Image: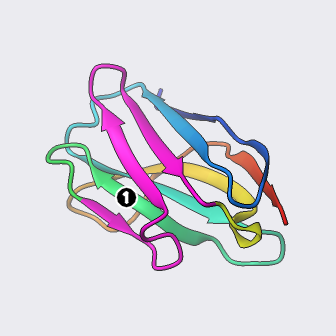
């Protein structure tokens, strides 16, 4: 059974940093793209960042470019999201997700972790 478990969320002040981690288990993810999404109250889910587990290629949403960094640890099977210079508008529930590399549909999702940035 595939599981994606997020951790690292919390309450921080604007300008602070936070690191989220996603522990992936239940299958081999070498042919998968792993992503982070977020959803704020009353808003649609937003793409944050993604990384190819195979070659490490990354993509970022425009609102986080230059502030967030996604990375993977092949030995630990984790996907991390380093978030720097956090803003109030980064407040959301952050979800880890995975999709096969040949599709654009994310088929595995975690339960989410809350990030709250006070202004």
52 with respect to 36 (left or right): left
Residue range corresponding to the magenta coloring? 58-85
- The residue at 40%/50% (across/down) is 70
- Residue 45 visible to an observer of this rendering: yes
How many marks the image carries: the answer is 1
103 with respect to 117 (left or right): left
Given residues 67 and 91, the one toward you in this image is: 67
- The residue at 64%/53% (across/down) is 94
- The residue at 67%/46% (across/down) is 112
The vertical placement of 19 against 26, above or below, is below
Given residues 41 and 87, the one toward you in this image is: 87
The vertical placement of 62 against 26, above or below, is below
Disc 1 designates what residue?
50
Q: Is residue 83 rendered magenta in the image?
A: yes
Residue at the top extreme?
Answer: 75
Q: Is residue 57 rendered magenta in the image?
A: no
Q: Secondary structure at mark 1?
A: strand
Residue 106 lies in what quarter of the image? Answer: bottom left
Measuring from the top left, give residue 35's x and y in whole percent. 43, 55
The vertical placement of 68 against 5, above or below, is below
Given residues 56 and 32, the one toward you in this image is: 56
Measuring from the top left, give residue 99's x and y in whole percent. 35, 54
Measuring from the top left, give residue 98's x and y in whole percent. 41, 49
């Amino acid at each position: 059974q595939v599981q994606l478990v997020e951790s690292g969320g919390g309450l921080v002040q604007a300008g602070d940093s936070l690191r989220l981690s996603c522990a992936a288990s239940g299958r081999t993810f070498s042919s998968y793209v792993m992503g982070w999404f977020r959803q704020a109250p009353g808003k649609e889910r937003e793409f944050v960042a993604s990384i190819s587990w195979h070659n490490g290629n990354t993509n970022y949403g425009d609102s986080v470019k230059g502030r967030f960094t996604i990375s993977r640890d092949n030995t630990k099977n984790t996907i991390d999201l380093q978030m720097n210079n956090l803003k109030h508008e980064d407040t959301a529930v952050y979800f880890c997700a995975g999709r096969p590399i040949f599709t654009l549909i994310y088929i595995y999702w975690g339960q989410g972790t809350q990030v709250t940035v006070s202004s």
